[in-house]
Image: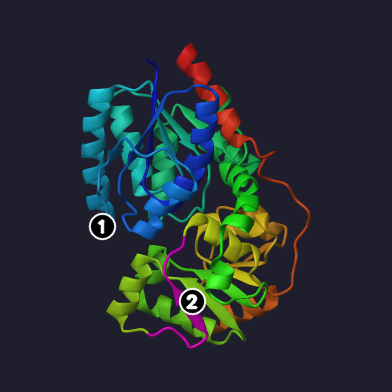
Amino acid sequence: MKKIITVIGARPQFIKAAVVSRAFAANNVVEKLLHTGQHFDTNMSDVFFDELEIPRPTWHLGIGGGSHGQNTGRMIEAIEHVLMQERPDWVLVYGDTDSTLAGALAAVKLHIPVAHVEAGLRSFNRRMPEEINRVLTDHVASLLFAPTTAAVSHLADEGISGAAVLNVGDVMFDAALFYGAKAETASAILSTLSLTSKSYALATIHRAESTDDPDCLRHILNGFAQFAGIIVLPVHPRTRARLSAAGLRLPDNIRAIEPVGYLDMVMLEKNARLIVTDSGGVQKEAFFHRIPCVTLRSETEWTELVEAGWNRLAAPSGAETIAQAMQAALGTTGKSIAPYGDGNAAGKIATRLLEEIAS
């Protein structure tokens, strides 16, 4: 029986897998999920499988919490063991996490072709672990599903082109369309938190470069403290640990909450005055819901959103820079653009992989 093994491990990958797995099922593609365990917190993992109706993983490796090297090495060994037993026709990986790179390397060394969803993204910042993961994965993949024309151009610049590269659009846009309406009826997060629409800003902080440097984290918090209003902050486990280690307190205007599921996050995003984030995925979700966004980085993979005025960059090198960017973004809109496809990226991915399996 022809089959695909999909390797996932982190929140954004669960969301992407939800729409692609649904497309696989509709096209009678046999798929098995392998969850590395990179996000092991219940609110960062289990809740997504429940509310997004993702098939339960066949394998859960339980690997997470270590350094990048520890995680990646242990994942490669464990994924290789599964692949040697199963011998799938393809391995599918998403994005730019340690799970992505581990799945790609384990597969290609066993001569199993790799398909990479969200191929071609580049920040051009090699200090980011995610940049290394995505570049290496692209260069071993046999099929590269790019989300934008810019991503296709980045691949061409690195000598990757031809029939292996497909601009299918962004599966996150598929998810926003499919789950946006569902969130309106299924989520009670606003009433639970006693929030009203447009009465708060929403922030997310989780990347290593934002949290591992105490000075950087302090600049972010001090910038938030200057914001005139409530900032709702779902606290990522990494961020919570770094705040404690650095002895930093959250400003009084921050409403800290536990990580939330996807549908609750969608509702918080759709009703925010402003979104402030270091997440690549949340930048796009802000645009999908037409909410102004400030990205706490000096660069972004989603340059089209900056160019169109939906997103603005604020490097976390000083509190004033962050505070000024947040104030300037309030009430703004960007140009009318549609860079992420027609909402059927998942269907195009399923169709192409079905063709490859059948050939």
Closer-to-camera residue (280/160): 280
Relative to 106, 296 lies left or right: right
Question: Which image quadrant for residue 324?
Answer: bottom right
Closer-to-camera residue (26/320): 26
Question: Which image quadrant for residue 210?
Answer: bottom left
Q: Residues within 10 Å of mark 1 (few under 14, many from 20)?
A: few
Q: In the figure, 289 relative to 102: above or below?
A: below
Residue lying at the far top of the rendered structure: 359
The number of callouts visible is 2
Residue under pointer 1: 67
Residue 49 position, x and y percent, is: 42, 46
User: For numbered disc 2, what is the local secondary structure?
Assistant: loop
Quadrant of the image containing the N terminus: top left
Residue 123 position, x and y percent, is: 51, 53
Q: Which residues are magenta?
A: 249-260
Mark in front: 2 vs 1 = 1
User: For numbered disc 1, what is the local secondary structure?
Assistant: loop
Where residue 163 is drawn, which disc sits there? none
- Gap in angstroms between the C-alphas marked 2 and 1: 25 Å
Residue under pointer 2: 317
Which SS does the magenta portion mostly show? loop
Q: Residues within 10 Å of mark 2 (few under 14, many from 20)?
A: some
* Residue located at (42% from left, 53% from top): 47
